Image (spheres, rainbow, N blue to C red):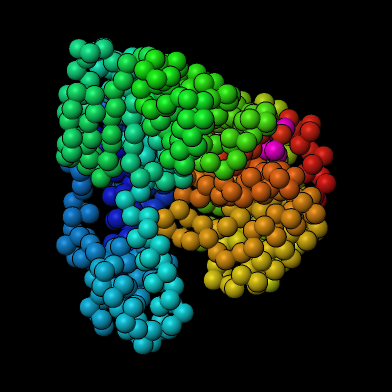
Amino acid sequence: MPVHNADIAAKLDEIADLLEIEDANPFRIRAYRNAARTLRDLSREVTSLLAQGEDLTELPGIGKDLAGKIEDIVKTGTTPMLDEHRRAVPPTLVELLKIPGLGPKRVKTLSRTLGIRTLKDLHHAARTGRISALTGFGEKLERQILHELEARAGAEGRFKLATAAQYAEALVAYLKASPGVGRVVAAGSYRRARETIGDLDILATARADSPVMDRFVSYDEVEAVLAHGGTKATVRLACKLQVDLRVVGEESYGAALQYFTGSKAHNIVLRQLAQQRGLKVNEYGVFKEERRVAGQTEESVYAAVGLPWIPPELRENRGEFDAAREGRLPQLVQLGDLRGDLHAHTNATDGRNNLTEMARTARARGFEYLAICDHSQRLAMTHGLDAKRLLAQLDEIDRLNETKPGITLLKGIEVDILEDGRLDLPDGVLGRLDLVVAAVHSHFNLSRERQTERILRAMDRPHFTILAHPSGRLIQEREPYDVDLPRLIRQARERQCFLEVNAHPERLDLADAYCRMAKEEGVLVSINSDAHSVLDFENLRFGVGQARRGWLEPTDVLNSRPLSALRPLLQRTM
């Protein structure tokens, strides 16, 4: 069975979790975390790299020992080290570590004193008040645990968009190789660029004699065949992702693509509009009584009800029909519109490539500029920059720019917003930068009022350019901190500063609704990779998808501007 990068990364993360419970060396734990992240962000499958004889140690953060373990996982699905630690630590305890507030010591305490070994045990103990009775826990943590467990229950069985992409793209390529197949596309929430995917809908066109259905259910990664017909089939992959395949004729392709893309709310309105015209819309076409009048293309389906084509990312019944009728549909931003990236890291802190390597890769993507924004000193675990080291980095950037590398490196910092709203470096130092990207990395549990005031005070500082990952969420891992985002957006408008759409698949932060609110308030948004290696620039496509769901056009995006137009905007905030 093929092993995807997400599968390997999950095993490496599990090793790190087990080591953490065992109180292993933090640097050793971090090595496995970094390796997992490298593989998740890798644009090529490790299996294909190995098949072509490439050296995995050339990947960032992958040494000889880790490369050997990765090869073991590719060949056997596991590695002896993982098996050894699974025997030493009950695997169910690893799940407890993923609950915010439960570090290794607390997990051990819960296991030893209350016999908690599973999330179900944890939920029961929290509901019955047994956790708050333990020394060092308390009622606040108990409430936090209950809230997190309930939130996770609602998200169970969903896959992050970037993880789903690994499985979807491989399966689509596999099906396209079937004899007699025309087009194959992943539809549903995947095509709408939702942050998480519950299941995968694949649509194909094929001749009647095509073996595509049999080929689908015989895919190496299929764990169970749930249904198998002539034009419909459903399987569950080994990763637990459910996949539905639907095969239609070319004459119905557009109607089926529209129907299976959804959303349900969007499709209900579309059918109502059709009924008002005496038409019927389904996955086979648009019909006037028994006569098909449209359906070969999506454009023809929308035209049949008097509308222009509506981009998939907008199909949520959140105003797109009125906008279409009134000619106000946005010309959505595309990946090619980005002229640069305003948030990237190097190995000066927790990145895995140096300045030259990051610049070279950004230039190869066609970027005109790249902002280097390593962490500030407060984040000790990332070896954050103090004033002295930051000033040395600025000199290094100047020297590299003087060599005319084909791209302009901008001087920046990802500076911590402290609990009282101060920034982590003095104004005299920040004033020497081209931009300041400010972020909350601590004190996530402040009250809504305190968290909001904290960030507002930071935005009032004389050197504040972009608010990074504004809600602080990690999808399926950490809830957003409690903050009044509409108020922050209004403050950004008044202060003439900017908000970030962080493109990392674990963040995708801002959420789409707040992207749209920023647009309505006239606040520019920067779609940034938050790259920690040359591989991470690939994540920008997910940030663009998030921005498109927020109705953003190129003019709404700060880094869609050429450097000559960008510099005055940055200087206005400094």
Left or right of 59 on screen, residue 341: right
Residue 352 visible in rendering: no
Residue 384 coordinates in the image, percent (x, y): 59, 58
Residue 242 visible in rendering: yes
Left or right of 225 on screen, residue 26: right
* Residue 396 sits inside the magenta stretch: no
Range of the magenta residues?
A: 556-561
Residue 325 coordinates in the image, percent (x, y): 63, 30
Residue 172's place in the image compared with 121, above or below, is: above
Residue 427 coordinates in the image, percent (x, y): 78, 60
* Residue 558 sits inside the magenta stretch: yes
Left or right of 255 on screen, residue 568: right
**Closer to us: 9 or 150:** 150
Q: Quadrant of residue 235?
A: top left
Residue 211 coordinates in the image, percent (x, y): 19, 17
Q: Quadrant of residue 177?
A: top left
**Closer to us: 497 or 574:** 497
Q: Residue at x 55, y 58 (%)?
A: 472
Figure disc tally? 0
**Closer to us: 265 or 380:** 265
Q: Residue at x 52, y 21 (%)?
A: 304
Residue 143's place in the image compared with 71, above or below, is: below
Q: What secondary structure prevails in the magenta region?
A: helix
Q: Quadrant of residue 85?
A: bottom left
Q: Residue at x 34, y 77 (%)?
A: 126
Q: Residue at x 40, y 16 (%)?
A: 292
